[in-house]
Image (spheres, helix red, strand yellow):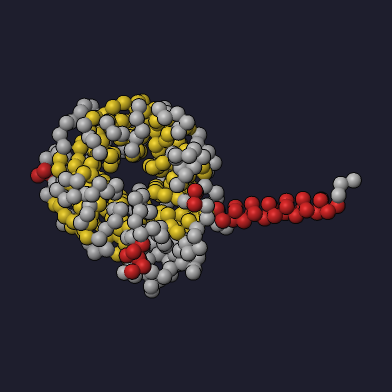
Amino acid sequence: MPNRHLLVRIAAVLRTLVLALAAAAALAAPAGAQAPIDLGPGRGPSLVVDAAGTAHIAYRSLDVRNATAHSVTYCRLPRGAAACDVRVVLPLPRHPGSVKIEQRADGALIILAADSEALWVAASADGGATFAGPRVLATGQDGAAPAGLSPDGQGAITLGLTREGTRLWRSPFAGADPRVLALNSASADLAPSYDLAVFGGGRMLTVAESGRGTEWSVFTGGDPLDPNAWPRRGTLRGHDNPVLAAGPRGVFLLEDRTNTEEILDRKAPFAIRSFDTRRLRWRAPRTLGADALGQSGAAFHWWPTADLAQDARGRLHLATAARDHRGGECIQYARTGPRSKQWFGRTTTLYRTRNKALQPEAPKVAAAPDGRGVIAWHTRTGTLAAEGNVYVMRTRQAKGRYRAIRDASDRPACGRRR
């Protein structure tokens, strides 16, 4: 007969393990939330959500066990699904530094990837079931990264942030264009943050982080590589990691402030300003003091800690990677209503962890016209040593009204107070 004391000790150990697993599950997924879906090794996700609510996600991937196995991975995630129903690996000869996925007005999916020597393109006309490519779209764009599609959807716009300033290339799908446009001459200090928005009348707005702030330029029509087609340019002081969101509500710019500004200057972690598309000028910033919204505790961060998107009905969606006061990390989410006078509601903490290896970075958000969306991010490290893993999670809006925070530097981060 087994030793009674041994059985008691085994039962105690099992009970401890069960409690630990339950606590870990509660930590990773707050009450009422779904656990994130692990897409596997990768970094730098980009995503779009179509009218049916299907998420299309592309990210750069590398198998560290095979130094030559560079690729872009595509995942199609239908609404309500727990895993990708289509997963495509697009091999490349070199590791891509950045990946961008876009959906054209005709429904075609376009994946753009830039490595140290070339800009690559792959396209799907059947909703991601199959892809043509990847093929080389352009060369000679050293240091450039895909920012989006040209206003006509027939080419790619890439931005290069050099010590001489911001450079722009247009790469038509029908043939190469070797020209390059100098958007500004201010030193970009090799900053990684830039964005592009296409809005009414085939116009474009570019933003790029520089040593002076956020450099912005407006394209009003004609040849995108003609300097005269960009009549308005300027600099917004004090901005970090600029993100643009264009749609039926207008064009908005998210300002991601550093932890130093938030604490020492007692500022809210984020602010949003809108662009006057008739007068081609910026309106005053509006503080985004959502009730529990916090940002990364790092004073300087190379990856943007927030993303802003606008759905087809004008809702603004904000996703942030934040740090709480107890050493935890989380993904937070807030959104507006569809009407222009509706601002952000309460903040929802969708995911929480204390595991530093699972720290979320570079969140991206997109949503269908009905407002239901998806957030994607990568972790600091993952199942393969040199790469993190890419995770996705569906958005969820907390019930109740927004509560203002008087002191922007003293807010409950990740839904928790000090």
* Camera sees residue 405: yes
> Which residue is the extreme one toward the bottom?
406
* Camera sees residue 51: no
* Image position of 296 with respect to 140: above or below: below
> Which residue is the extreme one toward the left?
228
Name the spot of residue 49 as percent of width and height, x first: 41, 43
Q: Residue at 38% of width from left, 74% of height from top? A: 406
* Image position of 83 with respect to 285: above or below: above
Q: Residue at 23% of width from left, 44% of height from top? A: 161
In-image side of 102 versus 74 (left or right): left
Name the spot of residue 241 as percent of width and height, x first: 30, 53
> Which residue is the extreme one toward the right?
1
Q: Residue at 23% of width from left, 41% of height from top? A: 160
Name the spot of residue 93 as percent of width and height, x first: 35, 27
Q: Residue at 28% of width from left, 39% of height from top? A: 145
- Relative depth, front residue between 157 and 186: 186
* Image position of 23 with respect to 405: above or below: above
Name the spot of residue 355 as percent of width and height, x first: 52, 52
